[in-house]
């Protein structure tokens, strides 16, 4: 396993860098046969951080800049996995909440709130006008089984006034979003397209 963080991101996220190196050491010292639980835990976490440092950090830095520009005060991240991306918001004035259905200890769970449940379900936010729902490679990304897109995006419309979704643009999710949300705006960034969903002002 390559323990070198890409683009010297360890300098930007030193706490994640230290955790990555610690877990990488476990994966090199152990094998699945030695201690399957410890090795599996470390390997899964390292893989999640690899994804964050390879493709995820730019998207969440974009989300942070977007939230600050639009004067949002909280981010609700649907499909947060282990929550490593919460590090982007660490030290800022923006509150972060992660949602995923995996049972685990989440990154920064001593600072931020996490909900272990599969979306969609009712989310009660204190201020819809300054709360931004986000989802990266989750909502609208996987196959549309049993009308999943409509259920997810309808619930999102019920719970939030604003959502920023990185979606698979050939999945049909965008067409579904346009039928539910009053405004759907494509925002291009280096690694793809975000869709900004808003209600009629």
Image (spheres, rainbow, N blue to C red):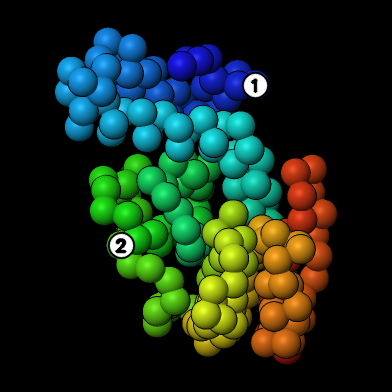
Asked whether 188 or 1 is in front, the reply is: 1
- Position in image of residue 107 (x %, y %): 35, 42
Task: Tell me which label, 1 or 2, sits earlier in the chain.
Answer: 1
Specify the quadrant that holds the C terminus.
bottom right
Q: Which mark is residue 7?
A: 1
**Cβ–Cβ below 8 Å for labels 1 and 2?**
no
Which quadrant of the figure has residue 95?
Answer: bottom left
Residue 22 visible to the viewer: no
Asked whether 7 or 132 is in front, the reply is: 7
Q: Which mark is residue 116?
A: 2
Give the vertical position of 196 relative to 111 (above or below): below
Label 2 Cα crowd, 10 Å radius (few <14 / some 14-19 / many 20+): some
Mark toward the viewer: 1 or 2: 2
Residue 75 visible to the viewer: yes
- Position in image of residue 118 (x %, y %): 38, 68
Position of residue 169 in the picture relative to residue 37 (left or right): right
Which quadrant of the figure has residue 41?
Answer: top left
- Residue in the picture at 54% in, 20% down: 5
Residues at marks 1 and 2, CA–CA distance in whole angstroms: 32 Å
- Position in image of residue 106 (x %, y %): 32, 47
Which quadrant of the figure has residue 105?
Answer: top left
Label 1 Cα crowd, 10 Å radius (few <14 / some 14-19 / many 20+): few
- Residue in the picture at 58% in, 24% down: 9
Asked whether 36 or 101 is in front, the reply is: 36
Give the vertical position of 61 relative to 156 (above or below): above
- Position in image of residue 37 (x %, y %): 20, 32
Q: Secondary structure at mark 2?
A: strand
Outermost residue, top side? 29
Q: Secondary structure at mark 1?
A: helix
């Amino acid at each position: 396993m390559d323990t070198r963080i890409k683009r010297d991101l360890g300098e930007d996220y030193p706490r994640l860098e230290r955790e990555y190196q610690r877990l990488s050491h476990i994966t090199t010292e152990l094998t699945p046969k030695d201690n399957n639980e410890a090795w599996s835990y470390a390997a899964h976490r390292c893989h999640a951080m690899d994804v964050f440092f390879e493709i995820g950090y730019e998207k969440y830095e974009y989300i942070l800049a977007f939230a600050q520009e639009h004067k949002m005060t909280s981010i609700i991240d649907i499909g947060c996995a282990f929550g490593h991306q919460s590090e982007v918001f660490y030290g800022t004035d923006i509150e972060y909440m992660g949602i995923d259905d995996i049972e685990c200890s989440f990154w920064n769970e001593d600072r931020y709130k996490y909900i272990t449940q599969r979306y969609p379900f009712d989310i009660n936010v204190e201020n819809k006008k300054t709360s931004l729902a986000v989802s990266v490679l989750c909502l609208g990304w996987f196959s549309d089984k049993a009308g999943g897109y409509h259920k997810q995006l309808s619930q999102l419309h019920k719970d939030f006034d604003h959502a920023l979704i990185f979606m698979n643009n050939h999945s049909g999710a965008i067409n579904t979003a346009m039928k539910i949300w009053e405004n759907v705006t494509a925002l291009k960034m280096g690694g793809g397209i975000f869709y900004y969903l808003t209600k009629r002002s």
